[in-house]
C-alpha cells in the first residue's frame, strides 16, 4: 500500500497535468512556482496545510489529496485462480479490495456529490449525527431514489 507522501505526490502530478504549466497550477492554488517544483522533484514533501490549500484552490473535496485515486478508464482486476476470484488471504487484503471498490464507485460521482458524501462521512465518523439526523438523511435519500 502506498504511503501518504507517495499518494500526495501522485495526486499533485495528476492535478498539475490539468494545467498548461506548473506556473499556471501554482498561481491557481496560491503557491510559488519554486515550491511546486520542489514538491514535484521530491526536495520538499507536501504537508497537511499545503494539501488543503491545493484542494481549496482547485475546488476539490477536503482530503482528496490524501487518498489514492484509480486511473480513469482502468478497471481494478481481482487476481484469479482457475477463472474464479481468489479470496483475500488477510483482513488487510479484504480492506484493500473493499477500498478499491469504493474508489471505483466514487470516480463515477460528480465532484459536488463526492464533496457532500465526504462531509456526511466526516460528520458520522466524528459522532456529530444524531439518530434523528440519520433518519432525516435516509428519508431525503429515499425521496431522491423514488422521486418525490
Image (cartoon, rainbow, N blue to C red):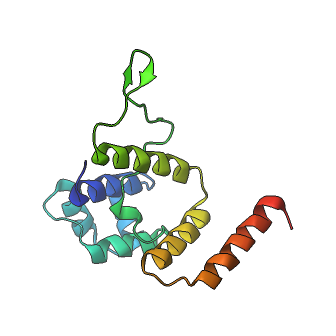
Across and down, in percent, residue 114 comes to 55, 63
Q: Residue at x 19, y 62 (%)?
A: 38
Please tell me whether residue 88 is drawn above or below residue 14 in the rendered image.
above
Q: Which of these two is toward me, 5 or 147?
A: 147
Left or right for 129, reference 68: right
x and y, in percent, of residue 129 in the image: 54, 82
Please provide percent x and percent y for residue 91: 30, 47
Q: Is residue 34 left or right of residue 78?
A: left
The residue drawn where x is 67% and y is 75% is: 137
The residue under the point 73% across, 72% down is: 140
Q: Nearer the viewer, residue 129 or 108?
A: 129
In depth, the one of 34 and 51 nearer the eye is 51
The image quadrant where one finds the C terminus is: bottom right
Q: Is residue 52 left or right of residue 33?
A: right
Task: State the residue at coordinates (31%, 52%).
Answer: 10
Question: Residue 71 in the image: x percent, y percent?
Answer: 43, 42
Amino acid at each position: 500500500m502506498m504511503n501518504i507522501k507517495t499518494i500526495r505526490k501522485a495526486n499533485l502530478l495528476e492535478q498539475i497535468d490539468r494545467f498548461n504549466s506548473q506556473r499556471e497550477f501554482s498561481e491557481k492554488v496560491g503557491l510559488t512556482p519554486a515550491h511546486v517544483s520542489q514538491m514535484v522533484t521530491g526536495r520538499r514533501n507536501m504537508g497537511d496545510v499545503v494539501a488543503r490549500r491545493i484542494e481549496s484552490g482547485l475546488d476539490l473535496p477536503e482530503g482528496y489529496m490524501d487518498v489514492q485515486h484509480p486511473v480513469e478508464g482502468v478497471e481494478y482486476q481481482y487476481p484469479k485462480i482457475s477463472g474464479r476470484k481468489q479470496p483475500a488471504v488477510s483482513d488487510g487484503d479484504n480492506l484493500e479490495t473493499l477500498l478499491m471498490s469504493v474508489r471505483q464507485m466514487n470516480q463515477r460521482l460528480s465532484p459536488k456529490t463526492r464533496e457532500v458524501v465526504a462531509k456526511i462521512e466526516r460528520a458520522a465518523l466524528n459522532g456529530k449525527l444524531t439518530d434523528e439526523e440519520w433518519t432525516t438523511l435516509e428519508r431525503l435519500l429515499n425521496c431522491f431514489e423514488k422521486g418525490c
